[in-house]
Image: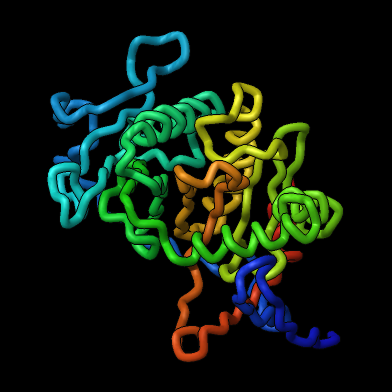
Amino acid sequence: MKKIKSEIRKSYLLNQYVIITPSRAKRPKDIKTRNLVKPSDSCPFCVNNLNKKNIIDKVNKKGNKKWQAVSIGNIFPAVTLNNFRAYGQQEVIIETPNHGVELGSLTLPEIEQLLKLYQKRTKAIAKNKKIDYILCFKNQGVKAGASLQHAHSQIFATQIIPEDLKEEASLAQKYFIKNNHCPYCDIIKKELKSSRKIFSDKNIAAFTPYASAYHYEAWIFPKRHLDNISLLNVEELKSLAKALKKILVKLQRLGVDYNYFLHNVVSDTDQHFYLKIQPRDSVWAGVELGSGLVINSISPEIAAKYYREK
């Protein structure tokens, strides 16, 4: 069998580099790493244990008065609205009333309702003029930082804009000035013609990024140029749910922990909204931590092919 040579790839905009080493790739069935959080009889996110006074917002099951997902205040926040030294807001999104059910196992309508709650909370938090950065994120599994098994995600909002987002915005603006196009609108068109395509319909595009820093990394974009999730219409939200479920079901089969996140810089209304999924089966070690170069042994082309398979 011919050995495939490694290749150094640069990120689309940021000055970040990845060494793709496909000859070292493992088959999907060989990379199971899931280490589930142990279940607990006193789970604080279960319906009977949930402190109803701590509920901030919710969405109900479709055609039902019972809740599908709720937002509660984080009882161990790093930032709060009453601390000017660390100002911000943190919430926990309980994704389902059912304990032990992973997000990828929820139905499409249930995932749509979760995304709808992200919309509602993003829109509400953005009204605070002191907040300029809103992050919706999920930690699935121990390796991704989860501490409770009950399916949940979180919202972190603060005054501080991360430096990599500032750099990304600056480079995107330079690209626009030079080409008169949003760089991500162009990237979407290019990737949907490539072997890295995962999913596409009239609303949403999903693909594995050219310089994937993580095994099976996947990005989901609306085709319409929108700067945050609250602006997606009903059909776009349904398509987003469909693409997200397709990817999460495949990661669930692999038994891989993952993070996903949705950024929103409130003051930057010309962002192109995205949802990035970063599996955590691989460990960054000496090369990554010492040089800043990431070694990825599963090429994005191989990952996309796996996602496309029935």
Is the residue 299 above or below the residue 189 in the image? below
Q: Residue at x 53, y 39 (%)?
A: 228
Q: Residue at x 59, y 47 (%)?
A: 271
Of residue 46 and residue 225, the one placed in the foreground of this image is 225
- The answer to whether residue 247 is seen in the rendering is yes
The answer to whether 41 appears left or right of 140 in the picture is left
Quadrant occupied by the N terminus:
bottom right
Of residue 204 and residue 302, the one placed in the foreground of this image is 204
Q: Position of residue 293 (x, y in %)?
A: 57, 84
Q: Residue at x 51, y 90 (%)?
A: 291
Of residue 16 and residue 60, the one placed in the foreground of this image is 16
The answer to whether 286 appears left or right of 48 in the picture is right
Is the residue 21 above or below the residue 305 in the image? below
Dividing the picture into quarters, in which one does residue 61 lie? top left
Q: Residue furthest front?
A: 177
Q: Residue at x 39, y 48 (%)?
A: 133
The answer to whether 133 appears left or right of 30 in the picture is left
Q: Position of residue 272 (x, y in %)?
A: 62, 46
